[in-house]
Amino acid sequence: MATTTALDRRLTKPKQSAGLWSDAFGRLRKNRLALFGLVLVILFLIAGAFGPILAPWDYKVQDLQAIFANGNRPIKPLSPGHLLGTDSLGRDLLSRLLDGARISVTVAFVVQIVILSIGVPIGALAGWFGGRLDNILMRFTDVIYAFPDLLFIILLSVAFRETAFGQALDGLFLVFVAIGLTSWVTVARLVRGQLLALKETEFVEAARAIGVSDARIVVRHLLPNGLSPIIVAITLGIPSAILAESTLAFIGVGVQPPRASWGSLIADGQKYVRGDPHLVLFPAIFIALALIGFTFLGDGLRDALDPKLKGKQ
């Protein structure tokens, strides 16, 4: 009888939920496009992190002997010693593409840190305190949102390009600041919306009742509960940062030579595009794969972290 009762208790015991993150990971694994994007992102990160080790040449070294033997023309792909060929100056294209990946990885993630550093505090202050402060901060956010992003980035880059600030880290520091200053508005609005939705909940009222400070409630309770849309926004914001950096480099106001950005590689190769299309084709493919990878992964995370989809997949 005791055995039967214990068996009945085990059979009737409710199944515990796996939790938000476990459920989200399970849904993400079922999304083939998201997994494909994750593979591309991992390859992109490996190329950026280990580019100098993987590169067959130093990104700025010229193979002048091969160039002279080829009539001062870029070396074609699949040539001995140069898998993807060289540029017009004899620099190995694969090595420069890997250096460009390193720049893109750095820009992508540092820009997101800048965005979080600006967007999260502004959104949190506006959402928690509300009233006049909320109105002032959101009108300021609207002004930044309405201003053309690329125009502001170009103006800032040109204005400070010749200064020590503009030349720090081969021009990368200016790129971080320029892109970050125009891209934080989405995160600020998301954080504000999450706090507005959560600050009237019962657990917040309970925390207030026992004397927990406003800062502790926001940092320890509200922001962690609103983390899902912020993660998605950051993941989907990385392709925009990569594209913005490549655009700046293409028009000559991004990273300074001899560093190799994918955008500057396309700009340098466009004059040879008819005879040597690989100078434009390979950097464009690298940009496209990076954008596709983060976009697919971001879309997959958005679907996986959406609580409305729980139990539907």
Image (cartoon, grey):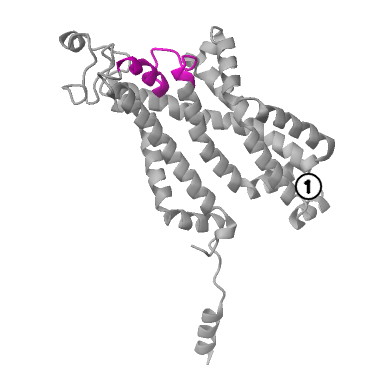
Using the image, determine if residue 197 lies above or below residue 262.
Answer: below
Q: Residue at x 35, y 26 (%)?
A: 283
Using the image, determine if residue 101 lies above or below residue 196.
Answer: above
- Residue behind mark 1: 212
Q: Nearer the viewer, residue 238 or 117?
A: 238
Q: Quadrant of residue 276?
A: top left
Residue 201 in sight in this render: yes
Q: Nearer the viewer, residue 209 or 176?
A: 176
Q: Position of residue 155 (x, y in %)?
A: 59, 15
Secondary structure under tag 1 reads loop
Neighbor class of circle 1 (other Cα within 10 Å; few <14, some 14-19, many 20+) is few
Q: Position of residue 306 (x, y in %)?
A: 57, 54
Question: Is 49 included in the stretch rendered in magenta?
Answer: no
On the picture, is 95 further left or further right than 135? left
Q: Nearer the viewer, residue 252 or 38?
A: 252
| Residue furthest bottom as drawn | 1
Number of labels in the image equals 1
Q: Which residues are magenta?
A: 248-272
Q: Residue at x 51, y 58 (%)?
A: 23
Q: Quadrant of residue 256?
A: top left
On the picture, is 149 further left or further right than 205? left
Q: Residue at x 22, y 12 (%)?
A: 73
Q: Position of residue 121 (x, y in %)?
A: 69, 34
Q: Position of residue 17 (x, y in %)?
A: 55, 65
Using the image, determine if residue 279 lies above or below residue 236.
Answer: above
Q: Residue at x 52, y 81 (%)?
A: 11
> Mark 1 is on which residue type?
Val
On the picture, is 95 further left or further right than 13? left
